[in-house]
Image (spheres, rainbow, N blue to C red):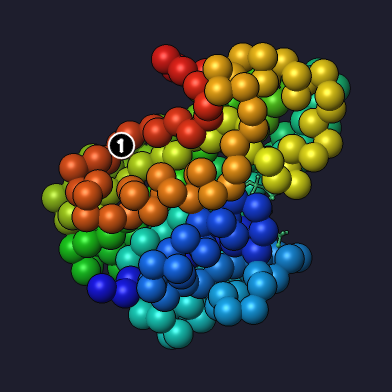
Amino acid sequence: MSRSVLVTGGGRGIGLAVARAFADAGDKVAVTYRTSPPPDGLFGVRCDVTDQRSVDRAYDEVTAQHGPVQVLVSNAGITRDNLFLGMEPEDFDAVLDTNFGGGVRVTRRALLDMASARWGRVILIGSAAGMMGSAGVSNYAAAKSAMIGFARSLAHEVATRRVTVNVVAPGLIETDLVADLGDRRRAEILAATPIGRPGRPEEVAGIVRFLAGDEASYITGAVIPVSGGYGMGH
Ligand code: NDP
């Protein structure tokens, strides 16, 4: 059956791979974008996830086109890395507000529809950093670990409505987000990654689609790493 799927930040990177995976399987997919529209063939809606009014407008547009959202993938995210003591407070806040706040704003809208429909899937894109922490990413790690507590609490609240809430926690995935990581940091991460290479966005998309399917009906409140083994055991 074709479902209404919404992917935030789906114009490029992991979000685009996720959107394509659902579209290829026949779902009705909408993606939000802020600056990079999706390629032709995907329904794109402009949205800044840091702005509740923008989220509301985008959400209304998506439901008018495809019906209430049944699968939400909260993926939009940014980094502003720096050591905490050198970090501008605005950079700390922006990362919290985009990665965590953005997920909260979109989930608030979608969860209401899912609870009424008594079926739904919320998948939040977290990060291995949210469990491990690392120098220079206090803002990002805080946002990503906040997602875990958020997801697990919601999992309790909506389970009886047949709505599941899970987090997918990627390791190093080859996208624009990590293009400026620096050779040293990159080498450190890969040295701690048993599979020994960065992941591809499609490798994240596969597990997201699995979590949205009937086969995953008994999985909720889980944090699923897709990290080549980086950070395993956390
Ligand atoms: P990209 O930088 O390639 O893409 C980020 C996406 O987020 C873009 O689509 C961008 O939209 C969107 N976005 C950023 N800010 C906003 C905003 N304020 N409002 C709406 N959309 C916004 O990154 P990735 O694909 O790598 O990252 C996707 C997710 O995966 C993020 O949550 C990231 O934290 C997570 N992740 C990535 C890892 C990696 O190694 N790549 C590792 C672990 C987690 P636009 O282009 O239109 O501006």
User: x, y (%) of residue 203?
Assistant: 51, 44
Can the viewer see residue 229?
A: yes
The residue most toward the left is: 160
**In the figure, is residue 10 to the left or right of 122?**
right
> Which residue is located at x 80 percent, y 40 percent?
179
Can the viewer see residue 74?
A: no
* Closer to the camera in the image, 175 or 91: 175
> Which residue is located at x 53 percent, y 27 percent?
228
Instruction: For the C terminus, give its image quadrant.
Output: top left
**In the figure, is residue 119 to the left or right of 174?**
left
Where 157 falls versus 171 (above or below)?
Answer: below
Instruction: For the N terminus, give its image quadrant.
Output: bottom left
**In the figure, is residue 184 to the left or right of 7?**
right
Label 1 packing within 10 angstroms: few (<14), some (14-19), many (20+): many
> Which residue is located at x 64 percent, y 28 percent?
197
The image shows a total of numbered marks equal to 1
* Closer to the camera in the image, 205 or 136: 205
* Closer to the camera in the image, 60 or 79: 79
Q: Label 1 is placed on what type of residue?
A: Gly
Q: Is mark 1 within 8 Å of ligand 1?
A: no
User: x, y (%) of residue 5?
Assistant: 41, 67
Q: Secondary structure at mark 1?
A: loop
The residue most toward the bottom is: 64
> Which residue is located at x 75 percent, y 65 percent?
35
User: x, y (%) of residue 133?
Assistant: 60, 19
Where 127 falls versus 61 (above or below)?
Answer: above
**Among the 4 quarters of the image, the one containing residue 149:** top left
Residue occupied by mark 1: 221
